[in-house]
Every structure is written in structure tokens, then in C-alpha cells.
Amino acid sequence: QVQLAESGGGLVQAGGSLRLSCVASGGTFGSYSMGWFRQAPEKEREFVAFISWAGGPTYYAESMKGRSTISRDNAKNTVYLQMNKLQSEDTAVYYCAAQKGPGYRAYVEYQYDYWGQGTQVTVSS
């Protein structure tokens, strides 16, 4: 059983940056590919970014390309999401998720086996 714990959310002004972290425990982190998703109020959860168990390839939602970077440190059992040029539409609860193996259908929620509790990101305009 893998437990995931996100941190790094908060309140930021539009145009600012945040780095989210997700620490995994209870499993072999290097065996899992990792994704970030988000859910805004009254909206469905959506894909944000993905990184395979080997550190690449990486994939991003169109809205995040060019202003976000997903990375991982297997020695620290941690995946990161660096987000820049944040806008009000980025306000959401951000979740990390893990799927065992090299990654399959990275955009699809039900491909993931484990989820964190989420961290709130609020962007003020």
C-alpha cells in the first residue's frame, strides 16, 4: 500500500510561482509512474502532468505546457510540480497519483492506483 502526501500549496498572486511536492511511502517509489491532477470548484478532476518511473517521458496538459515542470527524486521518494505564471484559472485542489510500471494512458484517472489527499492552490487576481 502506497501513501502519498502533497504539500506546497497556498495562496499566490497571479503571475507568481509555486512548487508542489508529493512524498510517497509504503512502496518502492521507483516502481511507480506519477501524475498530477487538479480539481477546481464545481469542475471535474483533470490531468495536469505525468512523469514515468524512469524520470521520462513527461507529459503535460495543454494549459500547463511551457509554464510547469514535473520532476522526481527517487532517492527522496518525491515528485515535484513547479508551476509558474499562475493564473486564477489554476485555482484548484492539486492531487498526486501513482500507477505501477512505466505509465499507461497517463491522462486517465482510473489508470492510477493510489492518490494523495490533495493540496489547495489559490491564485488571486
Image (cartoon, rainbow, N blue to C red):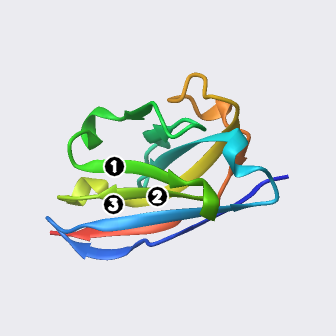
Q: Earlier in the sequence, mark 1 or mark 3?
A: 1
Mark 1: few, some, or many residues within 10 Å (few <14, many ≥20)? some
Q: Is 63 positioned to the left or the right of 5 in the image?
A: left
Q: Position of residue 88 (x, y in %)?
A: 22, 60
Mark 2: few, some, or many residues within 10 Å (few <14, many ≥20)? many
Tell me the distance, in whole angstroms, between the alpha carbons under discs 3 and 2.
18 Å
Q: Residue at coordinates 26% horizontally, 74% vertically from top-left? A: 12
Residue 97 vs 80, above or below: the answer is above
Are the residues flagged by discs 1 and 3 in contact, CB closer than 8 Å?
Answer: no
Q: Is 88 positioned to the left or the right of 48 in the image?
A: left
> Would you name the residue on which mark 1 appears?
69
What amino acid type should be assigned to the residue bearing mark 3?
Thr
Residue placed furthest toward the top: 105
Tally of numbered tags: 3
Are the residues flagged by discs 1 and 2 in contact, CB closer than 8 Å?
Answer: yes
Between circles 3 and 2, the one closer to the viewer is 2
> Would you name the residue on which mark 2 appears?
80
Can see residue 118?
A: no
